[in-house]
Amino acid sequence: MSIGIKVKKGLDINIIGAIPAGVTPVEIPSATVAIIPDDFTGLIPKMELREGDPVKAGQPLFHSKLDETLKVVSPMTGTVKAIVRGERRKIERIVVEGAAGEPLKFDTATALKTPKAARELLLTSGMWAMMRQRPFDIVPAADATFRDIFVTGFDSAPLGWYQTDFTADDIKEIEVAVKLLAMLTAGKVYISRRPGMNLPDIKGAEMVDVEGPHPASNVGTVIAYVSPVNKGETVGCLSLPTLKRIGRLLLSGTLDCSTIVAVTGSEVKNPRLVKTVIGAEISPLLKDNLADNGQHKRIISGNVLTGKTVEESGYLRAPYTQITVIPEGDDKAEFMGWASLSPSKQSTSPTFPGHFLARKLFRPDARLLGGRRAMIMSGEYDKVFAMDILPEYLIKAIIAKDIDRMEQLGIYEVAPEDFALAEYVDTSKLELQKIVREGLDFLRKELS
């Protein structure tokens, strides 16, 4: 069974460096991996291991300080090489050095028999921590009750890549994982997909065929069209790769933390797919594949809208399956600066020629191109905001910390990623995603 939705508001950003069709992933191992606690929003880490301790793939590295049943596990068998701490001894990352050895074996025999057993498997294997919930866009509490569960099956973000062909084994993994997730909700398990994807209807799931520009793939967009989140409700969210990983766990009894990463961007010589592991080193993935033009480059773990800036010596952030490399722009001298009328400048404003070249592939850099200023109520956000709320007024309510107004304007439905396009087109150059994240954290603290 399936339903169809068509997203009318949004924007596809055309950038040089997309993955060519028909590319086969290249396997590149990683000597070390790193897990960064900040990637698990809402979870305060407490270490279970020390530097030098041996660890198996699937073994917990740390758990939530507020609930020790909520765990984050190692994606690799080896040794805890380093626990890097920052100010006030905050854990910034845990580095695991790989070594030969067997992964941790999980007892999955009873996981599909009771909801309690299903929940325990997800918690102990670390798969629960790979999920998110609406409201607040955080790792769900260990005892969370889901109204529905939404699985994101594709990626419409700039240069995003997603699986379009599925084998019989893939379908088997997805079906068994859906069966387990269905035990955790009294509602439905929804899986979004693009028309044309070779993903058949999955037994036990409601398929959602989504058309339209980005943010068509955002789980918040799909939820808003299918069944919006109201106050007091909790909805579970996860990606299709995570769903498949749960299925492999159920079928094999071991946690497979391998992942396929899209290496994209205008500063990449040959955009390609790489099979590696969650938290892999960035440098091997980019080795001998960066443009030799002498320009400063920005490496992003994720896409240009929502990703995190990382160093070439850094690590792939856990939620992302994409690396984007674009020019930094700080070493570029351009006549008239941000006001340049060059047709190579990408813009949503009709003031610039690039606005009328919608199908052209651009090579944007990381410059702000303008200065931050007071919020301009121009209606710009509404043109790219796919959800049925008033984004400008919600942002003002968050800045004012007006809880009643925030609730009335739909704060429980949104996450920072839902404001990424609005941030891109914003004349005021406000950090909208940061504002929304701080607003969600403030609201959660006030209501707890």
Image (spheres, rainbow, N blue to C red):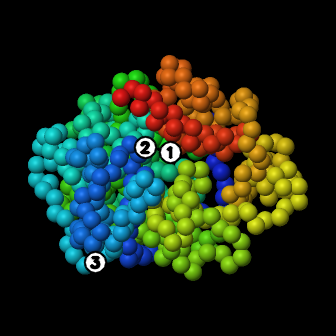
Q: Residue at x 26, y 47 (%)?
A: 70
Residue 94 at x, y = what percent?
Answer: 36, 63
For the residue labelled by badge 3, is the local secondary structure a helix, a strand or a loop?
Answer: loop
Mark nearest the camera among 3 and 1 is 3
Q: Residue at x 68, y 78 (%)?
A: 292
Name the kind of residue labelled 2 in the image. Ser
| Residue under numbered circle 2 | 192
Name the kind of residue labelled 1 in the image. Ser
Category of crowding for the residue at label 1, using alpha-carbon neighbours closer than 10 angstroms: few (below 14), some (14–19), many (at least 20): many
Closer to the camera in the image, 240 or 297: 297
Mark 1 and mark 2 in contact (Cβ < 8 Å)? yes
Category of crowding for the residue at label 2, using alpha-carbon neighbours closer than 10 angstroms: few (below 14), some (14–19), many (at least 20): many
Residue 98 at x, y = what percent?
Answer: 31, 75
Q: Residue at x 78, y 42 (%)?
A: 349
Name the kind of residue labelled 3 in the image. Ala
| Residue under numbered circle 3 | 99
Mark 2 vs 3, N-terminal side: 3
| Residue 95 relative to residue 399: left or right | left
Look at the image and tell me in which quarter the N terminus lies.
top left
For the residue labelled by badge 2, is the local secondary structure a helix, a strand or a loop?
Answer: strand
Q: Say whether residue 318 is visible.
A: no
Res. 387 mark: none
Residue 165 at x, y = what percent?
Answer: 41, 59
- From the viewer's perspective, is residue 1 above or below residue 54? above
| Residue 35 relative to residue 100: left or right | right
Q: Measure how far apart labels 2 and 1 are at the Cα level.
A: 8 Å
